[in-house]
Image (cartoon, rainbow, N blue to C red):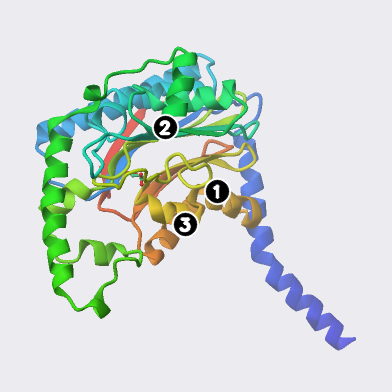
Amino acid sequence: MKKILSAFLIAVLLALPVFAQKGSYADMKQLQSPQNPRLGFVIHGGAGVIRKGSMTPEQEAEYRKKLEEAVTAGYKALQDGKTALDAVEIAIRILEDSPLFNAGKGAVFTADGKNELDASMMDGKTLAAGAVAGLHHVKNPITLARAVMEKSPHVMMIGDGAEKFAKEMNIELVDEKYFWTQQRWDDLQQVIKEEKEREQKKNDKPKSQNTENKPLTREEYYAGMTDAQKLPRNKFGTVGAVALDKNGNLAAGTSTGGMTYKKYGRVGDAPIIGAGTYANNNTCAVSATGWGEFFIRLGVARDISAMMEYRALPVQQAVDAEIKKVGNLGGDGGVIAIDKFGNIGISFNTDGMYRAYINSEGKPVVEIYKE
Ligand code: ASP
């Protein structure tokens, strides 16, 4: 009898933290009720080596202004009664049209000097999702991702086929030249030059030390590089948004040009549902930015949702735990998330992440560094 009693006691003690977390999570439900509809909106503009003083005050002001414009426009849409999906698309289109961000107009170049765009969107209410990859002519990839979700029976379309579908949907196509910007072109030239030097050094090494086929960690990849050399390889610039609308529906979207010097046909995490983007009304909406290969391998966005669903973790704890996993695997980047009660989670393991959200007073807050 004694044994049974002590086993029971141990079981209760072990279960306590789980119940405690569940309790506090359930308490948050009061925040979102029909009498107290809560809107929520968060965006990001990419994560990377963004240190205080690395930009001129004018450059920094430009970034801040664009982020504020996008977060305000998305939030206004929610206030006007539009859906979370509308708000996400509106804000991402603004960032795609700006040359400041690595999406749409400001997309980075591939190793063979092209711009290859990826995007995705997900509806937390229905778990419907749309994704596009390897685009060369679609001005606003996020709009095409939404069209795939809403107007096709598919989840993901790529390359020429996706562009053919864009034409059928009357979605704006542009000449490839539209995506050319001097800054991104210069970044590519610098990376090409350095990669040639690295290649040379590698060829000089004995074959036994050749690690070409092994995935590199962040430390290995950046080994020996100065900040100036790291800059063009920075993962900052991808854009994303997550929203909670007045009906309690969540949505997420992400759009990117990928990574400078990516190889032909490479697809990152941004258009992979569950890696760069995920939304589920029962948990949260997530958009990620960073070194995509790591985010795909971990299934980052879906894993955050799963931690909330299975372990009842609050959103901030879930995103922190996930970014730790990304770091442990050797990757870098960040995520934004919002839960079904409007609580926000933001986490990154880089020096900075362009980001903006609407605070509890309904005011836009823009942040760049680890503040
Ligand atoms: N995650 C994107 C990719 O790997 C890059 C980024 O976030 O800037 O394609």
Front position among marks 2 and 1 = 2
Instruction: Report whether residue 88 is seen.
Output: no
**Front-most of 166 and 2?**
166
- The nearer-to-camera label among 2 and 3 is 2
Q: Is mark 1 within 8 Å of ligand 1?
A: no
The amino acid type found where label 2 is placed reads: Gly
What type is the residue that disc 3 sits on? Arg
Q: Disc 2 designates what residue?
A: 159
* Picture coordinates of residue 245, whole percent (x, y): 55, 25
The residue lying at 45 percent from left, 39 percent from top is 271
Q: Which kind of residue does numbered mark 1 sit on?
A: Arg
Query: Label 3 near label 2: C-beta < 8 Å?
Result: no
Q: Position of residue 73 (x, y in %)?
A: 38, 20
Q: Earlier in the sequence, mark 2 or mark 1?
A: 2
Element type at mark 1 = helix
Q: Which mark is residue 297?
A: 3
Give 340 or 301, whichever is nearer the viewer: 301
Q: Residues within 10 Å of mark 1 (few under 14, many from 20)?
A: many
Q: In which quadrant of the rendered image does the N terminus lie?
A: bottom right
What residue is at 21 percent from the left and 61 percent from the top?
Answer: 222
Spot occupied by residue 67 in the image (x, y as percentages of width and height)? 29, 29
Q: Which residue is drawn at the image coordinates 54% and 15% (left, top)?
A: 81
- Can the viewer see residue 68? yes
Q: Tell me how far mark 1 sits from mark 3, CA to CA.
A: 12 Å
Residue 177 image offset from top left, x and y in percent: 21, 23
Q: Which residue is mark 1?
A: 302
Q: Work out how far the residue at label 2 is from the one at label 1, CA to CA, in angstroms.
A: 25 Å
Question: Looking at the image, is mark 2 or mark 3 earlier in the sequence?
Answer: 2
